[in-house]
Amino acid sequence: MRLYYPDLLPDCQIELTGEDFNYLKNVLRAGTGSKVSLFDGKGNSAQAVITGVYPNRMTVRTESVSASVETESQLKTVLLQGMLKGQKMDLVVQKAVELGATEIIPVITVRAEVRETRKIDRWKKIAQEAAKQCGRTVTPEISGPLAFKDCIKGFPAGVIFWEGGGYSLKKAGIHKTHAELAVAIGPEGGFTEDEVSLAKESGFCVCSLGPRILRAETAAIAALALVQYQFGDLG
Ligand code: SAM
């Protein structure tokens, strides 16, 4: 069991309360002397030992703190995801973290039906939980929402997935040497042709996910898996 704690220092006493406390005490039945693993979401892990158990809190002392990024892909992947309705973004955030995305930017596109959100903090929490579950020490950043046209500039390489046709990812002219890749997926209604052209002008390659039209959330998951397979750590 790994717990998230944002400020890890060696040989430091920290307090665990709330969900973490309940989980350790009531589910794992951990007590004084039990070992706990912690990560800070910035690439550091720590081994720690429980030093005290009280009615509503536990004290824990960190032993070693080390930078550990073995579960991070060498490819920095930024997912630009058209804003989706209902709870679909929750799913995309969770799966994007599991598939190694480094940053997730919800984007407002011409056809997005959702144009603003108060869910950024919720998505950050989902990202943190997903990082914890899948063994990552880095929690991907989630910012925005930003206008699609404003955030597609400045990437060393980018791919926009469009059901209107395009290259297979293999033939997209993306090289393994690109350390960072932006991956754009549209909302339920898809990208407009103007948005696809704009992305092309900004250096994005237009790519296909095959002959069937996938739901946006399926497309995001499939695209990230393919990208990691082709250029990241799933190959
Ligand atoms: N505009 C479409 C429509 O309403 O018929 C559907 C858009 S699709 C549900 C949402 C997003 O998933 C698209 O903007 C695209 O990024 C991605 N997508 C879905 N199927 C795809 C495919 N076969 N090839 C490439 N991208 C796809």
Image (spheres, rainbow, N blue to C red):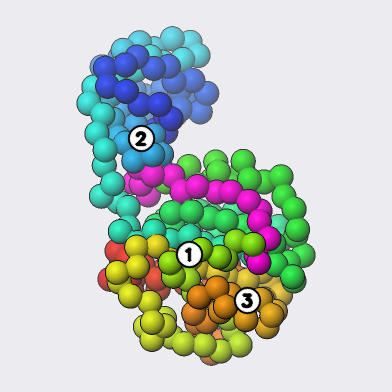
SS at mark 3 in the image? helix
* Residue 222 % position (x, y): 47, 72
Which badge, 1 or 2, is on the more N-terminal residue? Answer: 2
Label 1 crowd bin: few (<14), some (14–19), many (20+), radius 10 Å: some
Magenta segment includes 3: no
| Chain part drawn in magenta | 132-149
Circle 1: residue type: Phe
Residue, disc 2:
39
Residue 9 occupies quadrant: top left
- Residue, x 66% and y 53% (percent of image)? 145
Magenta segment includes 144: yes
In the rendering, which numbered label is found on residue 198? 3
* Residue 192 % position (x, y): 70, 79
Q: Is residue 161 above or below residue 141?
A: below
SS at mark 1 in the image? loop
Q: Is residue 27 above or below residue 172?
A: above
SS at mark 2 in the image? strand
In the rendering, which numbered label is found on residue 155? 1
Label 3 crowd bin: few (<14), some (14–19), many (20+), radius 10 Å: some
Q: Is residue 29 above or below residue 150?
A: above
* Residue 123 % position (x, y): 58, 47
Mark 3 → mark 1, Cα distance in angstroms: 14 Å
Mark 3 → mark 2, Cα distance in angstroms: 39 Å
Report whether residue 214 is seen: no
Which badge, 3 or 2, is on the more N-terminal residue? Answer: 2
In the rendering, which numbered label is found on residue 97? none
Circle 2: residue type: Phe
- The mark closer to the camera, 3 or 2, is 3
Tell me if label 1 and label 2 are in contact, CB under 8 Å.
no
